[in-house]
Image (cartoon, grey):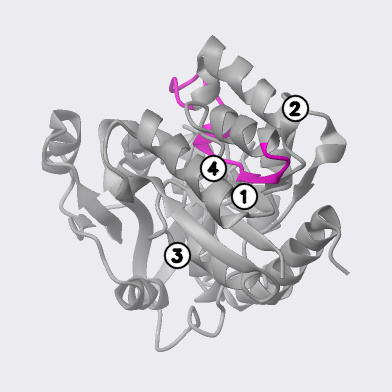
Amino acid sequence: MKKILVACPSISSPFVNQDVEFLRKAFQVETVSFDKLSNPKIITVPFWVLKTLIFKKYDCLLIWFSIPKFSPLLTLIAKLFGKKVLVIAGGYDITFVPEINWGEMGVWWKRIAQKFSFFWVDHIFAFSDFSRKDIIKYVREEKVSTLYFGIDADFFCPKGEKENLIVTTCFQITQTSILQKGLDSFMECALKLPGYRFLIIGQIDKSDSFALDFFKNAPPNLEFTNRFVTNEELRDYYRRAKIYVQLSAHEGFGIAVAEAMACECIPVGTKNTSLDEVIGNEDYLVNFNDRKSAVKLIQLIFDVNSSGDHFRNRVVKYFKPDTRSSQLNLKTKNILKVE
């Protein structure tokens, strides 16, 4: 059986873990999680990968997130030992959003590093067609294919009555994430719609003065969990919420949007992101920072009082875990020439 080494920033990510389990259906898999290694990581990460490739004789290195300070060196090490290299990418690592000065590709040497890395890799899996467009700026397009995330629609499912609640999520609330996730626009919607309850799910970074001021200036109808929540708690919020809002400047896929849709939340997203692929209806999209249109759309959804069942049906149809599993394993088998 062929062996694959998965290198990732954190194995605690549920979607990295999910892919590892998918690959274990057909391969022997080991992982290296950057956050588990000692500092300086620029030395310990490549050393650990080098040692593992030498002594455990892996056939393939799969890099989850193409981080410019790691990926080129890891790719070079693997290629020097004749190994295949796969990459899964599509977010901060392969883009730049000038409006908010966000993304790795805003720095010239990182663009060069990404081009070097992508030149040598055997294949790149993009989070979405939107992310694929970013990636092919740095590599031949035949090297890149779209691999949508799989959403567990058995777990993320509706239950109970919907409330007049509008939610969004942000893992950690910082100045950067407020701008990238459009939380400032979300707050503006709460200000303009005082008759509805708004909730931000995530923890405020207490060392970030901008985030603390953001929290202190929130209107009475905007609530915060101000802590990390479990998957069960997250699902319960989605089950209660009528609308899920994601007013981001950039989304490589929008996992939270799809999970909320699976719980029959009606989504509101931003154009020129991957959210048109996830939501599948441009009537539920607004331009980034177009707060007036976002307010109107949220009010219209409540006025019409439609159900979100067709959004759940879309998730069930297009974002199946089994589909991701089969596509990931099939492409990997072809690259490793496994019968």
Residue denoted by label 3:
14
The amino acid type found where label 1 is placed reads Leu
Task: Name the N-terminal-most of marks 2 and 4.
Answer: 4
For the residues labelled 4 and 1, say whether their Cβ atoms are less than 8 Å apart.
no
> Residue, x 84% and y 65% (percent of image)?
338
Q: Would you call the spot at circle 4 few (<14 residues within 10 Å), some (14-19), or many (20 or more)?
A: many
Question: Which of the image's four quarters has the C terminus?
Answer: bottom right
Instruction: Say if the magenta span includes residue 97.
Output: yes
The amino acid type found where label 3 is placed reads Pro
The numbered dot on residue 62 is 1
Foreground: disc 3 or disc 2 = 2
Task: Name the N-terminal-most of marks 3 and 1.
Answer: 3
Residue denoted by label 4:
65
Question: Against 61, is 301 above or below?
Answer: below
Query: In the rendered view, does 311 fall on the left or right side of 8?
Result: right
Task: Name the N-terminal-most of marks 1 and 2.
Answer: 1
Question: Against 23, is 170 above or below?
Answer: above
Query: In the rendered view, does 46 fall on the left or right side of 169?
Result: right
Residue denoted by label 2:
119
| Start-end of magenta stretch | 81-103
Q: What secondary structure is marked by label 3?
A: helix
